[in-house]
Image: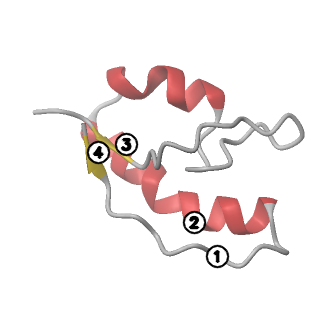
């Protein structure tokens, strides 16, 4: 079974926050994603909207995408 992913194909790592501007994961999380167990991926994905909101409080929150199974 393929790994679920929050990737929305907007892959830009912000040099200030260290977060991907599209999905909110860190570079380390992105690099390790394929090796993570599904429960760990789900746990990380659950926190991404809050992480992005904290990092970019002035931006209107985007709707949470459904996890992409790639």
Height in image: 42 above or below 13? below
Q: Which mark is residue 45?
A: none
Q: Which residue is mark 3?
A: 41
Give the image quarter of residue 1: top left
The answer to which of marks 4 and 2 sits earlier in the sequence is 4
Within 10 angstroms of label 3, few (less than 14), some, or many (20 or more) residues?
A: some
Contact check, label 2 and label 1, Cβ < 8 Å: yes
Contact check, label 4 and label 2, Cβ < 8 Å: no
Residue 26 appears left or right of 16: left
Contact check, label 3 and label 4, Cβ < 8 Å: yes
* Rendered residue at 68%/48% (across/down): 21
Quadrant of the rendering where the C terminus is positioned: top left
Q: Which residue is mark 4?
A: 39
Height in image: 36 above or below 45? above
Q: CA distance from mark 1 to mark 4?
A: 25 Å
The answer to which of marks 1 and 4 sits earlier in the sequence is 4
Q: Residue furthest front?
A: 9
Q: Which residue is mark 2?
A: 49
Q: CA distance from mark 3 to mark 4?
A: 5 Å
């Amino acid at each position: 079974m393929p790994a679920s992913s929050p990737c929305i194909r907007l892959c830009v790592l912000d040099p200030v926050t260290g977060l991907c501007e599209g999905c909110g994961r860190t570079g380390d999380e992105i690099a390790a994603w394929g090796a993570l167990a599904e429960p760990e991926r789900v746990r990380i994905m659950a926190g991404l909207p809050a992480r992005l909101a904290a990092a970019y409080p002035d931006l209107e929150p985007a709707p949470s995408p459904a996890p992409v199974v790639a």
